[in-house]
Amino acid sequence: MGIPRGNVIAVSGYEFESGETEDVYAQQWGATNGNQFILWLSEEGGNKTFVFGDKDSLHQDTTITLTFNKYIPTIVEANDEDSLEKGLVEVQEGGTVKIDNNINLTKHLVINKPITLDLGANNIEAGAQAVLIQGDTTVTGTGTINSSHQQSAVQVENAKLTLAGGNVNSTTLYGINLVGDSELEINGGNVHSKDSCISSNNKDSEHSIITIEDGELTSDTDATIYMPAPCTINVNGGTLNGGINARMGTINVNGGTINSISSGNDNIKDYYSFQGNVWLGDAIACMAGTYTSPFEGQSNKLEINITDGTINGLCNGCSAVTIYNLGKVAQDISVTIGENATLTVVDDTQPLYKKVAAKDIVPAEADDYAEYTAVENTVVENIAEKFIA
């Protein structure tokens, strides 16, 4: 077995990086073949110094330094909380952690490097804990992450989560919460939650991107997606049961089905000043003119672009798409709805698309009437004629 200079040399479960030629494997620290020889001389600061040369004249040869790294596996298997936590540490970036058994968590599960989490057919029972995504993560399999955490089952923190399979189930509040500059892509699997399946916070989310390609997202009580931050929502496929509630950002609908909640919606006249998630009954409901983004360089612009897909308003008194045009702060607002989209309502007294002025929302006798009607924001509209009442 020849060991020419510049080769990558892997010895007994360790990796050495030097050069770009093919791997050479030696089973011991010293190996000879013909007049080639490798000898381990010393170790300092994580490096091992080797001498290459013929066995009769080692002292005359050149000394080179190779970086010494412990072997890092590309696939690890986990069958309990300890092995899962250990596997997430040991697996190499871009590797796979395979779940081989149902696992109960007693503390938050933190994923802080790019990996694939293969659930198989197994469940992660998080209880009151959550899964924290701090490194780009792809979830596969058919199993479920079950959580009753007080905020969300999964929290994505300045990272990307791709749900290519598997399920997320939150019995307490939100399914997946986005923090900072995060990204969520759902092209398989399902999300079920008591409140919104996907959420963020205006103070915590600078600019996240949500893309729905496939899968089913179901909220028991309110909007499937609650987005009060300057984020981008792309719906290209899949089914959203609960609708979208946004205050700012960009909503692009190019396919899929968006169903509103069918009952239990809040009256906007009672909640126009509420700063959180108002349970509105429209399939796409936007409370505009209420606040700005606290992040420098981000605006509170609201832009809706609907080119295709089906949007169903299933709640009495509600539409498929509604802009609640409040006037506490200035906001650029635009709505485009193309002819290829399908909009429906169950209440035939309601238009498919509508905008509601602040003076028709805020009671005239309210103490904050002047505050919430101070600005008259213009809505720039490009609506296909068939959707105009």
Image (tube, rainbow, N blue to C red):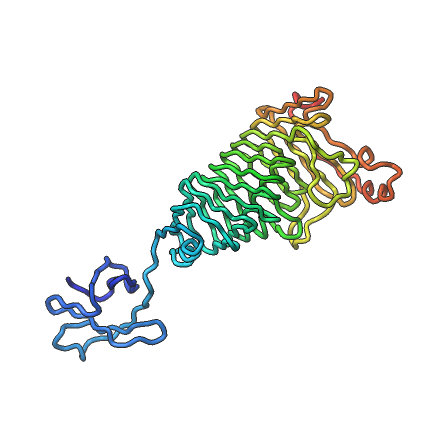
Determine whether 127 is above or below 326 in the image. below
Determine whether 5 is above or below 198 in the image. below
Determine the image quadrant of residue 221.
Answer: top right
The residue lying at 58 percent from left, 41 percent from top is 171
The residue lying at 51 percent from left, 37 percent from top is 190
Determine whether 242 is above or below 21 in the image. above
State the quadrant of the C terminus: top right
Is residue 124 at least partly visible in the picture?
Answer: yes
Which one is nearer the viewer's eye here, 175 or 335?
Answer: 175
* Residue 69 on image: x %, y %: 33, 65
Q: How many marks?
A: 0
Is residue 164 at least partly visible in the picture?
Answer: no
* Residue 85 on image: x %, y %: 44, 56
Task: Classify residue 290 as left or right of residue 125.
Answer: right
Task: Classify residue 189 as left or right of residue 272.
Answer: left
* Residue 311 on image: x %, y %: 61, 28
Task: Classify residue 270 as left or right of residue 109.
Answer: right
Q: Outermost residue, bottom direction? A: 59
Which one is nearer the viewer's eye here, 166 or 148?
Answer: 148
State the quadrant of the N terminus: bottom left
Q: Outermost residue, left direction? A: 34
Q: Outermost residue, right direction? A: 365
The residue lying at 21 percent from left, 61 percent from top is 25
The residue lying at 20 percent from left, 63 percent from top is 26
* Residue 22 on image: x %, y %: 23, 57
Determine the image quadrant of residue 341.
Answer: top right
